[in-house]
Amino acid sequence: METGPLHFGVIGGGLLGLTLSLRLAERGRRVTLLEASDRVGGLADAWELGDVAWDRHYHVTLMSDSRLRAILAELQLDDQMRWSRTRTGFLVDGQLTSMSGLADFLRFPPLRFIDKLRLGWTIWQASRRDDWQTLEQIPVADWLIKHSGRRTFNQIWLPLLKAKLGDAWQRTSAAFIWATIQRMYAARRTGLKYEMFGYLPGGYARLLSAFQAHLQTLGVDVCVNRPVRRIERDDDGGYAVTGADGEVSTFDRVVVTLPAPTAARVCPQLSEDEIARLADVEYLGIICASVLMKKPLAGYYVTNITDAAPFTGVIEMTALVDPAELGGRTLVYLPKYLTAEDAAWSKSDDEVRVEFIAALERLFPNFDADDVLAFRVSRVRNVFALSTLNYSRRVPPIETSSPGLFIVTSAQIVNGTLNVNETIRQAESSLDTLCQPLPHPLPAFGHDAPADRELIARPR
Ligand SMILES: Cc1cc2nc3c(=O)[nH]c(=O)nc-3n(C[C@H](O)[C@H](O)[C@H](O)COP(=O)(O)OP(=O)(O)OC[C@H]3O[C@@H](n4cnc5c(N)ncnc54)[C@H](O)[C@@H]3O)c2cc1C
């Protein structure tokens, strides 16, 4: 018999782990959150850049991000969001052109009229279909060439695919581009006339600190500086979670929210098949430079680059965020998405700086390297799971062979892009599975589990 509230250990304090902790606590469960770093937030956390503090990676909220906005409302922050329409630029053959609306699109110099019609058709029909399982079986290049034509593919789509996927674009399915276009059209689906981009004054640091405080008022034990090394079923059917310092915490149920290969490492008792499935998920990583400057760069929130460059896009955050938030400075992010094997991982911060600043000078004639006030590099190896052919058939399941041990990770997002709203949806949609009664008696598990043992949850 289970007595008292079940005690859940949630491993990983990114937005996924935070949301799970919130919703489990609201359902009356006892929750302890274990986060490796010295603060919660993961990919969305903040850091210091020169004398300002802002998000380590660029983050924008869409007005149509209903799940994220529901959490912002619960934290009494949604009414403080600042919304605006931003502009998008395209750097093609050394020319920076606006691509911010239909008029810009019709004028867009690199493409002939017929190419524009085919490009428009590609985007329009992708925004309307919902058979992503069909698209998952088709390589993205084949699908885009079929609908947009080879010229437009080479001039527009291929540089964009390389920008977001590095060399892995060749292994990616058409579901990836479908999900990206779906996000662009999310506003229409949620009844808005057009999309607005938003941010919270104070950035994600403010959201995260309010989130952590709210969890604590609900009784969640938020533990930072607690990297988890091993999760093992113990003799009475609960779980022993061992930290890097050897400290052991015990729980009735454990939910791992880490990237799939890390989950495989910390759950050694899972079956060989389960471990292989987790370890085999292919991730893209990112090298993302934050640059603080004296003057604005180009005024576009996003500039897509189709010319050769060491980074794969330019995000001018202060085209969205009021520069007053950053002491009147301009904040620009220079991301480079890359596969695990890419040689660029071995570059030092200084090498990245020299290469990226030289490229900015080449691509933006108004940019002056003397205007750079601070430059900082973030490197993350496992950012998002690559949408390879038929990925949804290989995605690791939430339930494991060990009753009470669950994996809820962004790698399970099969029909959306990686963003906070989808991450929250992934957490929320897993709740019924996490809270369901376990089989009774529990099956034996692990290499040394006695076969006839009755394993039941007990108060902790
Ligand atoms: C460059 C970039 C730009 C982005 N832009 C946007 C945007 O504009 N809008 C948007 O909505 N989303 C954006 N995102 C996506 C958003 O950041 C993610 O959707 C979200 O942060 C994923 O949260 P998560 O909890 O799944 O993963 P993570 O944030 O990776 O959280 C995992 C957590 O687990 C911890 N951890 C790892 N190992 C252990 C261990 N052994 N023990 C304990 N803890 C451990 C990590 O420290 C981390 O805190 C962006 C992401 C990146 C990288």
Image (spheres, rainbow, N blue to C red):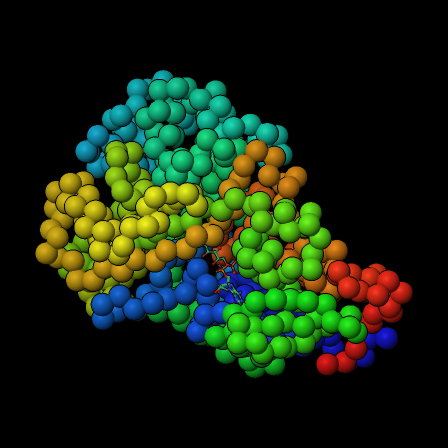
> Residue 58 placed where, x, y %?
36, 56
Q: Is residue 438 above or below residue 351?
A: below
Q: Quadrant of the C terminus?
A: bottom right
Position of 214 compared to 289: left or right?
right
Observer able to see residue 1:
yes
Whether 404 is drawn above or below 3: the answer is: above
| Residue in the picture at 42% in, 49% down | 285
Image quarter (top left, top right, bottom left or bottom right) of the N terminus: bottom right
Percent of width and height locating residue 235: 78, 73
The foreground one among 198 and 176 is 176
Instruction: Tell me where residue 111 appears, x and y as whole percent.
Output: 30, 23
Answer left or right for 450 relative to 145: right
Quadrant position of residue 38: bottom left
Q: Which residue is nearer to you in this view: 216 or 265?
A: 265
Which residue shows up at 66% across the image and 39% down it? 393
For the point 54% across and 37% down, the residue is 388
Is there any visible trace of residue 291 in the rendered image? no
Residue 331 place in picture, x, y as percent: 25, 58
- Give the residue furthest to the right: 452
